[in-house]
Amino acid sequence: MSPTPLQIAAQRLALAGKVAVLTGAGISAESGVPTFRGPGGLWENHRPEDLATPQAFARDPELVWRWYNWRRRLIAGCAPNPAHLALAALEQRVGDFTLLTQNVDGLHRLAGSRNLLEVHGNLWMVRCTVCGALYEERGLGLPARPACRQCGGLLRPHVVWFGESLDSAILDRAWRAAAGCQAMLVVGTSAVVQPAAGLASVAKQAGAFVIEVNLEPTPNSREVDVSLMGKAGEILPQLVD
Ligand code: OAD
């Protein structure tokens, strides 16, 4: 009997000494964190230009903070799911492992992942718009206009908004991980937001075996070596075991 796509993917993953993983909102969906696109997605009822751009924050920081505080409270009640845990277990077994995530929810770190690049930032970090101070802020009852503990300036979430550049050092490391891996897993991303969406192509063109895990086909699906359709929380534990 010929091996199933899942078995082929698991074998290639087990043989790879260098693994890169790219995750998106879909990996946290089974933890109860809403995705951005698709049914029930955040962008169904909210316009990104009202909430996730520097212009929106300049216009109405209290509105933007209300949305982020709502998301912080929601995510504070969520725990890593079997997909996050499978990636943390995989990291223990692979010599060279890099996890690139577009998610800002912090669930990968909570699951135990360590070599992690949060390319869109982290919702639990805040940055001062005046002095640039950057620190963790886990409070769930932040004031309408949270103030910097160092200079009193207005804080913003330390996340990347539409129209902003990614941190060039992080992007550089992400690119190198994608270009240098032997196998790449792409999990739960609609693959429409650049530059993160392009990382699967970088890996593929550099000769890596690329495996996609998603509920539905994406722009990456035709290019990858194996596309596994289903829930990340069910497929990743099988792939890694
Ligand atoms: P999206 O919301 O665009 O896509 C989520 C993907 O996950 C979709 O392709 C779903 O089919 C898939 N999915 C949903 N549930 C799943 C499950 N249980 N198992 C596997 N797959 C599942 O999220 P991202 O691709 O992460 O950026 O979005 C990219 C960026 O766009 C985000 O980082 C955010 C957003 O606007 C910024 O805020 C800058």
Image (cartoon, helix red, strand yellow):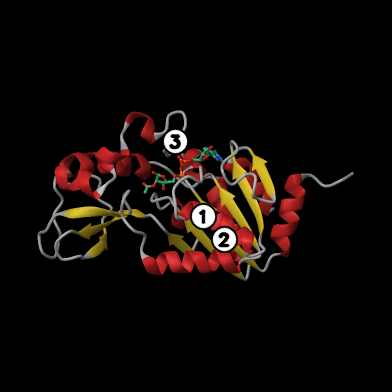
How far separated are the C-alphas under marks 2 and 3?
A: 24 Å
- Location of mark 3 (residue): 37
- Location of mark 1 (residue): 198
- Callout 1 amino acid: Gly
Q: Give the x, y percent position of residue 124.
A: 31, 53
Location of the N terminus (image quadrant): top right
* Residue for point 43% across, 29% down: 40
Q: Give the x, y percent position of residue 97.
A: 57, 66
How far separated are the C-alphas under marks 1 and 2?
A: 6 Å
User: Quick check: is the Cβ at mark 3 less than 8 Å away from ligand 1?
Assistant: yes
What is the secondary structure assignment of the residue under circle 1?
A: helix
Q: Give the x, y percent position of residue 14.
A: 71, 61
- Callout 2 amino acid: Val
**Which one is in front, 126 or 222?**
222
* Residue for point 42% across, 58% down: 118
User: Does residue 7 appear anywhere in the picture?
Assistant: yes
Mark 2 / mark 3, whichever is N-terminal: 3
Q: Give the x, y percent position of residue 73.
A: 31, 41
- Location of mark 2 (residue): 202
How far separated are the C-alphas under marks 1 and 3?
A: 18 Å
User: Does residue 97 appear anywhere in the picture?
Assistant: no
Residue 220 appears left or right of 123: right
